Image (cartoon, rainbow, N blue to C red):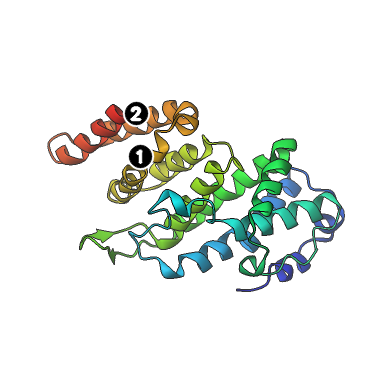
Amino acid sequence: LVSCSLAMASAPTAMKSAPLACDLSSDLGMSYASLLRTSIILPYLSSVSGSLDSSASALDSSASLPGLGLGLSASLLGYFSSSADGDASADLGDPKEKDTSASSSSALATLLASNSEHALLLQHALRSSLLDLMKKKPVSASSGTGTLSLMSPEVTALFDTTLALCASTTLDAGFIFTLFEDAFSYGTIALGKDIFAYLEKHSTLLAQPAFFNRGKLIILRICTSLLRRLSRANDAIFCGRIQHILACF
């Protein structure tokens, strides 16, 4: 991975000297979000997705939840801390070389809870990262079930990491549903089936009260939107899967 510090070093002077601001309607706010996306989030997703195929998930068991995304948490914590001190050019290093103890995740959760601007900036960066990844030309890849998947390992890694951050209360539990809604809006029906398969795979976790209470309206909106886009005659099986998820939630 290219060191995050190289991207910071090439940042505009105004970004290096100004405190972190999350006015995403301003050029400076958008620049911070773009820098966060390109120097930390996308490199991290690329590194952790190397061992995944298109259908794999690092969240095959709830036991893997606590450890997932700790490297990203440590880098984000360093980024926000240095930016708050007016030194956005601090050396953040490689996310995989950061302290991956649970304390970094806890510290990041505390920081985001006390600063809504940082939380909004991170959410915007994650959503724009998803858009960047989905703009890439989809490449079919063989999944463990013998079917073809259009969802890239990077998108799977983004969902996995975001779900872990939401489960650890680093991010609002409802944000993962917002990310799902973005993905269904950006993608085709064919890609939507793969994304929906991911949602089905983790439906037990997502149906827990901490997630369900924050995302039930978004799930309803996703499902009704999909049903409007589908042909009941040609996509009867997929329509049935959607109805099943609605029943589960």
Judged left or right of residue 54, residue 7 is right
- Kindly identify which numbered label has been placed on residue 61: none
Q: Amino acid at mark 1?
A: Ser
Residue displayed at 30% across by 35% down? 226
**Label 2: few (<14), some (14–19) or many (≥20) C-alpha neighbours in 10 Å:** some
Farthest residue, direction front: 63
Vertical position of residue 100 compared to residue 159: above or below: below
- Kindly identify which numbered label has been placed on residue 249: 2
Vertical position of residue 83 compared to residue 49: above or below: above
Q: What percent of the width, then of the height, locates residue 38?
A: 62, 61
In front here: 169 or 90?
169
**Numbered disc total:** 2
Farthest residue, direction left: 233
Q: Is residue 151 visible?
A: yes
Vertical position of residue 159 compared to residue 174: above or below: below
Residue displayed at 28% across by 47% down? 193
Q: Quadrant of the N terminus?
A: bottom right
**Which residue carries the number 1 mark?**
203
Residue displayed at 32% across by 44% down? 196
Vertical position of residue 183 compared to residue 208: above or below: below
* Residue 155 position by quadrant: bottom left
Q: What percent of the width, then of the height, locates residue 194?
A: 31, 51
The residue tagged with tag 1: helix, strand or loop?
helix
Q: What percent of the width, then of the height, locates residue 105?
A: 64, 50
* CA distance separating discs 1 and 2: 9 Å
Q: Amino acid at mark 2?
A: Phe
Residue displayed at 34% across by 28% down? 249
In front here: 170 or 243?
170
The residue tagged with tag 2: helix, strand or loop?
loop
* Residue 9 position by quadrant: bottom right
